[in-house]
Image (cartoon, helix red, strand yellow):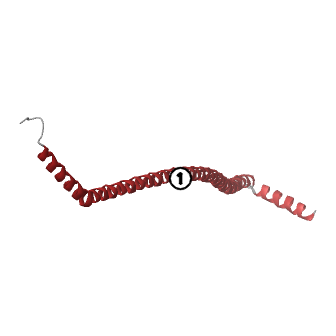
Amino acid sequence: MNLLLPDSGLLFWMTIIFAIVFFVLAKFGFPIITNMVDKRSEKIDKALAAAREADEKLAALTQEHEAMIARTNAECSRLMQEAAAEREKMIEQAKVDAAAQADKIVAEARVRIEKEKEAALKDIRQEVAKVSLSIAEILVRKELSSDKAKAELADKLFDEVRS
């Protein structure tokens, strides 16, 4: 018996068993295996399609996000310009208001100064009149200290009234 060469009966039965196993596998095993491989292939295709769709959605969302950022930046710039314009307007209004307030204060001060000046002039005139009367009184007393001077003054006044 040769160890490297199989016996013809062994070959026959091995061929028969192989054919039976192959037939059973072909009838029952291979369809299940191919069905599972097909299902797995479909799942992989669906997953790839979903991944492509997710990539497309992500790209669309990225574009939308960039557009939204651009709109936001434009809106921010517009608001900043409006705020700067409003600030300038408020500054100009404050300057105008301050100038008007200063003019009003100056006018009020001028009026007050004028009133104080008039009051001071009135007081000075009153004081000058009092001093003049006092001086006149002193002079008249001095001049009219004698009876002769009194008579002359009375005659003089009488002559002035008649003329």
Answer with left or right where residue 91 lies relative to residue 40.
right
Residue that protrudes farthest toward the right in the picture:
163
Answer with left or right where residue 73 lies relative to residue 51.
right
Q: Quadrant of residue 50?
A: bottom left
In this rendering, the count of numbered labels is 1
Q: Quadrant of the N terminus?
A: top left
Q: Is residue 97 visible?
A: yes
Residue that mark 1 sits on: 72
Q: Quadrant of residue 158?
A: bottom right
Q: Is residue 123 visible?
A: no
In percent of the image, x 31 and y 55: which residue is there?
A: 37
Q: What type is the residue that disc 1 sits on?
A: Thr
In percent of the image, x 83 and y 57: which residue is there?
A: 152
Q: Secondary structure at mark 1?
A: helix
Q: Quadrant of the C terminus?
A: bottom right
Residue that protrudes farthest toward the bottom in the picture:
162
Q: Position of residue 133 (x, y in %)?
A: 71, 56
Report the front residue among 21 and 147.
Answer: 21
Report the front residue among 82 and 20.
Answer: 20
In percent of the image, x 92 and y 64: which residue is there?
A: 162
In percent of the image, x 50 and y 53: which residue is there?
A: 60
Q: Position of residue 140 (x, y in %)?
A: 74, 55
Query: As displayed, is residue 134 above or below residue 5?
Result: below
Report the front residue among 152 and 158.
Answer: 158
Q: Quadrant of residue 123?
A: bottom right
How many C-alpha atoms fall within 10 Å of the one at disc 1: few (<14), some, or many (≥20)?
A: few
Q: Position of residue 146 (x, y in %)?
A: 74, 55
Q: Position of residue 40 (x, y in %)?
A: 32, 56
